[in-house]
Image (cartoon, rainbow, N blue to C red):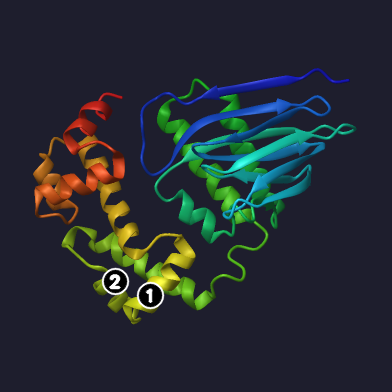
Amino acid sequence: MPAHELVSSTFSRGKYIDLMPYQYGREVCTPGHAFGPFRRSHYLFHYIISGCGTLAASDESGNQTVYRLQAGEGFMIFPGQTNTYYADMDDPWEYIWVEFDGIRVKESLAFAGLAESSPIYRSGNDGLRDTMEQEMRYLVDHQDASAFCLIGHTYLFLDGLLRSIVAPRTASTSKLQDLYIREAMSYIEQNYQNGITVEDIARQTGLNRSYFGKIFKSVTDKSPQQYLIDYRMTKAAQLLKLTALSVGEVGRAVGYPNQLHFSRAFKGAFGLCPREWRRVNTHA
């Protein structure tokens, strides 16, 4: 019987908004070794290096599905999702994992077809899959690297994961709808500071607001209004952390001429008012 082997580390080098690793590790499991039932606060991806095992995970409606998995496959655990996973008795798995989060992670995973009801990773590109695994191994093997180095390799891991998936965005949205959403996101990125509205975004895509809102939510799992707010708050957090601009100046820079409205929106997104968030995070 093989000895159980576990290597893991947590990321404790400050707080980042767009993408941030929380922990990463590798585990060689003994037969029948199990974890759960448990709920995570962030996204957690396991890639199976060898052997096989079983995942039992709940979907968005709370219904549980059991998945049998083997080497070369993987599974995503979502925030708040209840799951249990355990190694095979005859051929226990070895896996490597990364736990991560960020303001655009959910929409990126959804765009690639990963969701609580479809959490299984299967590669359609061996080269990209190998690149993904290499980036995961880098995180595990270089725990003392700088924060920006580790975050950079987390981006490369996520890129390899998303681009190697068998069938990104299958039935839920058409290529034409994807084009509309990319146009909307590009418009937001270029104009978020100008006080734009959902009507402006829909008009840019040439769709009426009702239909635009429906397809936007089907792709990103967010309403256009919530996506716009989240994007603005992400930029606001970056300005608060990296510049000496006043709270009012930051608010105006992200499309909120009224400081009170900005402070309320920011607290709704991060749980702290802008001044308190800056105090906590500037020297984190």
As drawn, is 98 to the left or to the right of 200? right
As drawn, is 4 to the left or to the right of 137? right
Instruction: Give the foreground label among 2 and 1.
Output: 1
Residue at the spot x=73%, y=30% of the render? Answer: 34
- Asked if one can make out residue 236 in the rendered structure from this viewpoint, the answer is no
Q: Nearer the viewer, residue 215 or 243?
A: 215
Residue 50: x %, y % from top left? 79, 36
Provide the residue designation for mark 2: 201
Q: Nearer the viewer, residue 42 or 125?
A: 42
Residue type beneath disc 2:
Ile
Residue 87: x %, y % from top left? 79, 33
Provide the residue designation for mark 1: 212
SS for tag 2? Answer: helix
Local packing at callout 2 (Cα closer than 10 Å; few below 14, some 14-19, many 20+) is many
Q: Nearer the viewer, residue 70 or 130?
A: 70
Residue at the spot x=33%, y=58% of the render? Answer: 226
Question: Which circle's residue, 2 or 1, is located before the other in the chain?
Answer: 2
SS for tag 1? Answer: helix
